[in-house]
Image: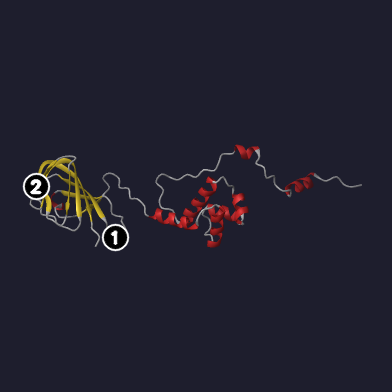
Amino acid sequence: MPRKPSASSESSAQDISPPDTQPTAAEQSAPKETITAAADETRLGLEQHIARALKQQRVSQGYKISDVSRIAGVSQGMISKVENAQVSTSLDTLNKLCNALSLPISKLFSDYDVNGRGAQLTKAGQGMQVVRTGTEVGHAYQLLSYKQGPKKLYEPFLITMDDASEVFPNFCHAGHEFIYLLSGHLTYRHGDKFYDMGPGDSLAFDAGVPHGPEKLNDVPIQLLSIIHYDDE
């Protein structure tokens, strides 16, 4: 007389049966994948950049990892590791994944290069204190941007002057300069010309011509100075 299959045998038979390709009610009600980032996130490493870009592309196209695995011929486990930046994938595997997601591999790396040209946030009062001519007599400079790579293109300074009796030497340097008066009143000289300036006034000039404050009429004075250096 044939033996009746045990419950454990039935369970094993169920375990090896092909999975249902139709989404279950639980899968349909599950929240969709989302990708978030911290507001002050620092520059990503290459693996993290690749992981995020591939996952964003997959989610945007409505693919599951199993879909990409089938199209690309890459195991689900490997795709999961790539998307979580747990492995440095080979170029061959990366090319398969990009092809499956219709994502040009050249764009993947060019986007990473663009991200490398980042921004520098300088909070109020946290500019770099620098010493220039006049600093020793109450003339304070804050350099507001200094991470520009090997070639310096410009320098933005926040300048504060609070000694009305201060006498300034002539400044003369390469480039062009733009100044914008934030507060106070002064007379500014450029060559043999003099300009009376109040809050909101601005002045642009060739910095190779001797220039500088001629008279501080109403202190404290605060102005923004941006020096642009010409290409050599």
- Under tag 2, what secondary structure? strand
Classify residue 166 as left or right of residue 79: left
Residue 151, numbered circle? 1
Answer yes or no: is residue 166 visible. Answer: no
Q: Which residue is mark 2?
A: 194
Amino acid type, residue under disc 1 in the picture: Lys
Classify residue 32 as left or right of residue 113: right
Crowding near the residue tagged with mark 1, few <14, some 14–19, many ≥20 C-alpha atoms within 10 Å: few
Classify residue 188 as left or right of residue 42: left
Residue visible at 19% across and 47% down in the picture: 179
Q: In terms of sequence position, does the residue under pointer 2 or pointer 1 come before the other?
A: 1
Q: Please determine whether, in this image, residue 89 is positioned above or below residue 156.
A: below
Asked whether the beta carbons under mark 2 and mark 1 sit within 8 Å of each other, the answer is no
Crowding near the residue tagged with mark 2, few <14, some 14–19, many ≥20 C-alpha atoms within 10 Å: some
Classify residue 4 as left or right of residue 208: right
Nearest the viewer among 151 and 231 is 231
Whole-percent x, y for residue 133 in the image: 15, 55
- Quarter the C terminus occupies: bottom left
For the residues carrying marks 2 and 1, which lies nearer the camera in this image? Answer: 2
Residue visible at 47% across and 53% down in the picture: 49
Residue visible at 48% across and 56% down in the picture: 47
Whole-percent x, y for residue 199 in the image: 17, 39
Answer yes or no: is residue 136 visible. Answer: yes
Residue visible at 32% across and 48% down in the picture: 121
Q: Measure the alpha-carbon separation of dots 2 and 1.
A: 33 Å
Whole-percent x, y for residue 32 in the image: 55, 41
Nearest the viewer among 30 and 134 is 30
Q: Please determine whether, in this image, residue 195 is positioned above or below residue 206.
A: above
Amino acid type, residue under disc 2 in the picture: Phe
- Under tag 1, what secondary structure? loop
Looking at the image, what colour scheme do you see?
A: secondary structure
